[in-house]
């Protein structure tokens, strides 16, 4: 068996070092961007392409977008999207197989659209899919690599790095999903009470620093217990889910909706004074009055709500105190008219 040359040993040593650095990045960080950046930089260090990029699959649009791109005018690629199946990278995303193309002019799948946008001259392309068990997550693309130094060993090494990248992406998505589960209420899809106080603390700090107001609505459903008693808990849960959707639909993108517990909900309205918050509260009240719930179940339930409103910093300056104020105003409504709005320092609406 012939002895390895000095060059082969150097390459082997370089591969081991890169594997070590990538494995270290995977185990020491949950930040997907930094892990992928490490993998791509090590890949570029080893293969020395003119340019390289990581394209991620947008499954909803059935497109590829440039998540990371390096090279002159790479910033142009931020707005470029390829259809899955378009170009060599699109072919790889569609079929889940690597493509090594020494001369793109001889390849029927090559698309010059990226070259046209960047004014690059692509001569050769190596595209490798990032595969999870069920689907292709993305494609790593190396442009203009020295093909004379690219053999079976390099193919194996590149595929191994791509497998690492796929693992990092899958892990990050699972972590994101787990984090969502810890702050989300299963029944309604709104945030839960645990996340409420964390969000409120952040909003108190931000509003204090920049001199903003914000308002909180505390919502309690009227006679919800009778729904459970009459129709059962499954209908009660379906009703809560539909009400969660109704509340969310009335809010801006910057607003937050929480299920506080049972049939109680909290809405946080950043950068919103008392009069503006009252407009939102009335809109929610009108939404309740106009809606019939659980129609798919053959019911036409009409549910009303008692709503309390408090505003930072006029009614309270601490997160728990703001909730307490809004809660107290809700109880003022609950113990009098129901189906109404109680406003801190103003009382129940006439």
Image (spheres, helix red, strand yellow):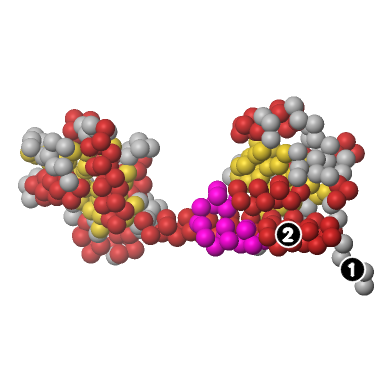
Q: In the rendered view, does 85 fall on the left or right side of 349?
A: right
Q: Which image quarter is the N terminus in?
A: bottom right
Determine crowd level at label 1: few under 14, some 14-19, many 20+ residues with C-alpha closer than 10 A: few
Residue 21 falls inside the magenta stretch: yes
User: 239 and 53: which one is in front?
Assistant: 53
Determine crowd level at label 2: few under 14, some 14-19, many 20+ residues with C-alpha closer than 10 A: some
Q: In the rendered view, does 287 fall on the left or right side of 307?
A: right
How far apart in space, not on screen, are marks 1 and 2 (Cα)?
18 Å
Going by the picture, which residue comes out furthest to the bottom?
1
State the residue at coordinates (18%, 51%): 320
Labels 1 and 2: the sequence-earlier one: 1
Task: Residue 277 in the image: state x and y as whole percent.
Answer: 22, 34
Is residue 320 at all visible to an observer of this figure?
yes
Question: Is 217 placed above or below 3 here?
Answer: above
Residue 3: mark:
1
- CB contact under 8 Å: marks 1 and 2: no
Is residue 279 at all visible to an observer of this figure?
no
Question: Is 185 placed above or below 271 here?
Answer: below
Residue 17 falls inside the magenta stretch: no
Give the extent of the magenta segment.
Answer: 19-36
Question: Is 280 placed above or below 247 here?
Answer: above
Q: Which image quarter is the C terminus in?
A: top left
State the residue at coordinates (81%, 38%): 110
The residue tagged 2 is: 15
Task: Residue 100 in the image: state x and y as whole percent.
Answer: 83, 49
* Dominant SS in magenta: helix
Q: Secondary structure at mark 2?
A: helix
Task: Residue 133 in the image: state x and y as whole percent.
Answer: 65, 62
């Amino acid at each position: 068996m012939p002895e390895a040359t000095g060059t082969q040993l150097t390459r082997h040593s370089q591969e081991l070092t890169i594997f070590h650095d990538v494995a270290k990045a995977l185990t020491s960080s949950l930040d997907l961007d930094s892990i992928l950046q490490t993998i791509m930089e090590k890949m570029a260090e080893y293969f020395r392409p003119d340019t390289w990029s990581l394209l991620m699959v947008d499954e909803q649009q059935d497109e590829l977008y440039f998540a990371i791109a390096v090279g002159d005018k790479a910033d142009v690629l931020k707005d470029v999207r390829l259809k899955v199946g378009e170009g060599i990278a699109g072919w790889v995303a569609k079929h889940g197989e690597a493509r090594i193309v020494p001369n793109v002019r001889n390849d029927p799948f090559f698309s010059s659209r990226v070259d046209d946008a960047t004014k690059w001259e692509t001569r050769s392309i190596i595209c490798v899919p990032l595969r999870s068990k069920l689907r292709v997550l993305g494609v790593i693309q190396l442009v203009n690599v020295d093909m004379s130094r690219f053999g079976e060993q390099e193919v194996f090494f590149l595929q191994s790095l791509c497998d690492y990248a796929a693992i990092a992406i899958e892990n990050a998505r699972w972590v994101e999903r787990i984090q969502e589960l810890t702050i989300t209420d299963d029944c309604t899809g709104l945030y839960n009470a645990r996340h409420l106080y964390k969000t409120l603390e952040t909003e108190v700090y931000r509003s204090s620093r920049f001199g903003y107001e914000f308002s909180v609505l505390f919502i309690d459903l009227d006679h919800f217990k009778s729904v459970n008693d009459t129709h059962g808990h499954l209908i009660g849960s379906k009703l809560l889910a539909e009400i969660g959707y109704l509340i969310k639909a009335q809010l801006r993108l910057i607003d937050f909706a929480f299920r506080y517990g049972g049939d109680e909900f909290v809405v946080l309205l950043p950068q919103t004074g008392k009069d503006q918050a009252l407009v939102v509260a009335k809109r929610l009240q009108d939404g309740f009055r106009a809606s019939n719930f659980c129609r798919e179940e053959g019911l036409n339930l009409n549910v009303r709500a008692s709503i309390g409103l408090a505003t930072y910093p006029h009614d309270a300056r601490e997160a728990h105190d703001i909730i307490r104020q809004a809660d107290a105003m809700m109880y003022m409504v609950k113990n009098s008219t129901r189906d109404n709005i109680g406003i801190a320092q103003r009382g129940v609406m006439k």
